Amino acid sequence: MMSVAMMMFTCQLLAQEFTTPGEGKAYSFQALSAISESGVTFSDGAFIVNGLVTIAPEDEFVIDPGVTVSFTNEGELVIKGKADLRATTPTRLCASGETSTSLGLNVQSEELVEVSNLTFEQVGLRGGVKAGMNVSDCTFLKHNGSASSALFLGGDGASFKVVNCTFENCQKAAIGGAANYLCPLIVENCVFKRNSQANGNVPQLNLTAAKEISISNCVVEGDTTLTMVGGIGVANWFGTEGLHVSISGCEITNNRYGITTMGVLDVDINGNTLSNNRFEVNPNNGGSGISLYDPYYKQKAKVTGNIIEKNLWGITVIGCGDVNLGKTEVEVTSPDYNPGGNIFHDNGNNGQPYDLYNNSANTVYAQGNFWSVNTQDKESIETVVFHKNDNPSLGEVVFMPAGTTQGVELKLLKDQENMVIYDLRGMKVDAKNLRKGLYIINGKKVVLK
């Protein structure tokens, strides 16, 4: 016979779980709070999720605009049906306490899910969707680390788009997913600051490669007290071919390292600023502005028009197949043509400058670049490049001819008129939006300093 104490305990467990009947109805937090057995209540101006609430596959969930929703430690909302998470006015999803372990929101819909205008504080968003998810104008603050990232990419093959979002002070990665899920991802105009506060060996963006990963016009700023946290990491752990990674127009600063790409990938790194990524206690373990790593020697990388400064290492090449940091000796129409235009400045460690370290047996082309030397000649550039001349077992770096572009102070161009300006991607740029880097101005290459 079951004891009274055991019966009470069983009732408490049952009370913490609720699933909608699956009758084709739409639910919201307001609607759930009107169902006594749902575990959702309303108190002091906020909805409180006290246990596991599941929206059945046949039902729908619609977010309440302009409300606050608090999740207790056991609180979680799992949406298996349709989901409309577009709030017309800002909506706040938060944890009930500073030591929360709540998983927050878990979306497992079959159809594409739109998420906008939500703030997640301590709790996170898991997207186990099959058709993908678009997340825009959302904020993720102080995620509690209950999942491996504040925004977790789930559903193998599902496409995600993240636009105009902010991620700050999350315990683990801002965006990440399972190593065996190949989820195409677009990230645009987002801000990432001081994430991976647990200080594990996890970058702020901890991504598994997919057919297409594109990160553009983002800020990735680290916490200088953390020595294990990189900026952006993209890895292909299974050797799958045909995966492309593009990182462009980003400002990546104050991390353990800036960008690292691992495994068999086709990589395009273009027009970024990678500065002060040096917070690694042992330079042999990190501190690169850009690290290209592939022991299978199949990774292809094209690196153009980046500013790479004040890192322990400018660029490190470990293995990889075809690394092109600038190839100007071929015709402009050649697919191998790369104007270079990378600007290196003040990279190094232990008193030794390192703009480029070729730790591979391959020849690396790095023509048309601007190095951390006063005179852009062969003898001077040799002092900041480590390659075959320093260790006969390594491949050569072909860095001549170096860049010969005219240098101009950025502030002198801000108010100029009648200028036709293009970036290295061929995109037209307004003079008011200029920043440091290499441009084509009135048909001439110009470095803005």
Image (cartoon, grey):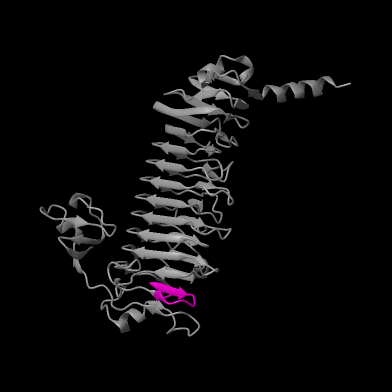
Q: Quadrant of the C terminus?
A: bottom left
Quadrant location of residue 7?
A: top right
Identify the residue at image location x=38%, y=72%: 355
**Where 281 sits versus 362, above or below?**
above
Residue 381 can be seen in this image: yes
In magenta segment, residue 433: no
Residue 89 image offset from top left, x and y in percent: 38, 26
Q: Is residue 361 magenta?
A: yes
Q: x and y percent of residue 154 in the render? A: 55, 42
Note whether residue 225 is visible: no
Judge from the rendering whether residue 68 lies leftward or rightward of residue 447; answer left or right: right
> Viewed as shown, does residue 440 lie left or right of 355?
left
| Residue situated furthest left in the rendering | 418
Residue 175 vertical position relative to residue 408 in the rendered view, above or below: above
* Residue 176 in the image, given as x and y percentages of width and height: 52, 47
Nearer to us in this view, 15 or 129: 129
- Magenta span of residues: 350-364
Residue 110: x, y in percent? 54, 33
Nearest the eye: 424 or 387: 424
Q: Does residue 173 appear to the left or right of 448 in the view shown?
A: right
Residue shown at the point (58%, 37%) measured from the top left: 99
Which residue reaches farthest front? 333
Number of labelled discs? 0
On-image quarter of the N terminus? top right
